Image (tube, rainbow, N blue to C red):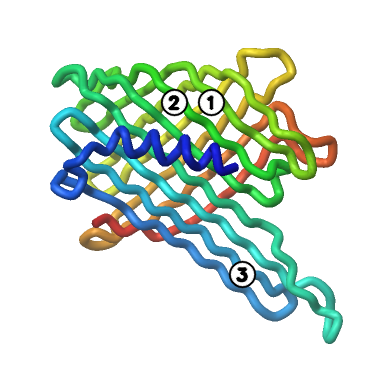
């Protein structure tokens, strides 16, 4: 795990450069909380911090996601608290600009700790080419593709490393100045038979409430092709959150 953190930190540091503090930047903070009481007692928390800044030669993005859910199980004095979801995801990407038309070379690193996925951790490093296929006043489509390497460890099992091809794409369509649809898709396809291929999809609609505050409804799918026998291949999350731009 120490090696994975070192690789992630090194990739992000290389992309940032020495002028990070002086670079134009923008970010968003996302938070959703659901608490129920009475016959069913649960607490759910979903949070996200995304940050982007521009340098003369680099365009850098960072993201931290967290999901937590706790349920009260049993009745009366027999009630016990049980954590039923606990997930953290960290990623960083730096795009080295090749020209003014959005073509770039990228470096990417991610780390995920999902307590109930069957994996102790999943981490990826990748590099390749990124570009924007089109952009209009209403929509855009951008993508990146390149080779990479994954570092995974199954709960109670051995570490596994494999070469992958990483492909990520993002499409956005504005319904108006106050509402938009966003589709993000990424896959880390294993290049060897029997190795894990991980795919993530997020479909979201957001609407501006006032100023920098918006509301977002999202449906997220995560699929692993190779998982322990007692785990499902696909996890889904439906969320409604508030987003603050800064």
Q: Is residue 143 left or right of residue 220?
A: left
Disc 3 secondary structure class = strand
Q: Is residue 132 left or right of residue 143?
A: left
Q: Is residue 53 left or right of residue 37?
A: left
Identified at 58% across, 18% down, the residue is: 163
Quarter occupied by the C terminus: bottom left
Identified at 31% across, 47% down, the residue is: 51
Q: Residue furthest top?
A: 192
Report x, y in % for residue 235.
66, 42
Q: Nearer the viewer, residue 205 or 120?
A: 120
Q: Would you name the residue on which mark 2 appears?
A: 168
As drawn, 71 above or below 227: below
Query: Is the residue under label 2 in contact with that under label 1 (CB below 8 Å)?
Result: yes
Q: Would you name the residue on which mark 3 appears?
A: 43
Report x, y in % for residue 172.
33, 34
Report x, y in % for residue 67.
56, 56
Q: Which callout, 3 or 2, points at the residue further toward the start of the chain? A: 3
Q: Residue furthest bottom?
A: 77
Q: Nearer the viewer, residue 201 or 20?
A: 20
Q: Nearer the viewer, residue 203 or 19?
A: 19
């Amino acid at each position: 795990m120490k090696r994975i953190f070192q690789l992630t930190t090194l990739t992000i540091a290389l992309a940032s450069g020495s002028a990070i503090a002086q670079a134009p930047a923008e970010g968003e903070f996302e938070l959703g909380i659901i608490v129920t009481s009475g016959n069913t007692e649960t607490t759910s928390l979903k949070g996200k911090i995304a940050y982007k800044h521009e340098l003369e030669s680099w365009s850098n993005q960072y993201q931290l996601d967290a999901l937590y859910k706790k349920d009260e199980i049993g009745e009366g004095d027999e009630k016990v608290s049980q954590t039923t979801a606990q997930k953290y995801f960290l990623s960083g990407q730096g795009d080295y600009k090749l020209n003014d038309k959005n073509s770039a070379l990228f470096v990417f690193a991610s780390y995920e700790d999902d307590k109930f996925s069957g994996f102790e951790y999943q981490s990826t490093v990748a590099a390749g080419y990124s570009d924007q296929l089109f952009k209009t006043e209403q929509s855009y489509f951008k993508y990146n593709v390149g080779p990479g390497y994954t570092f995974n460890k199954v709960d109670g099992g051995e570490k596994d490393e494999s070469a992958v091809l990483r492909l990520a794409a993002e499409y956005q369509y504005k319904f108006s100045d106050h509402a938009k649809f966003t589709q993000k898709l990424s896959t880390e396809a294993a290049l060897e038979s029997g190795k894990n291929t991980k795919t993530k999809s997020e479909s979201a609609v957001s609407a501006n409430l006032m100023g920098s505050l918006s509301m977002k409804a999202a449906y997220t799918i995560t699929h692993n092709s190779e998982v322990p026998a007692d785990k499902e291949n696909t996890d889904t999350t439906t969320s409604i959150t508030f987003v603050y731009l800064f």
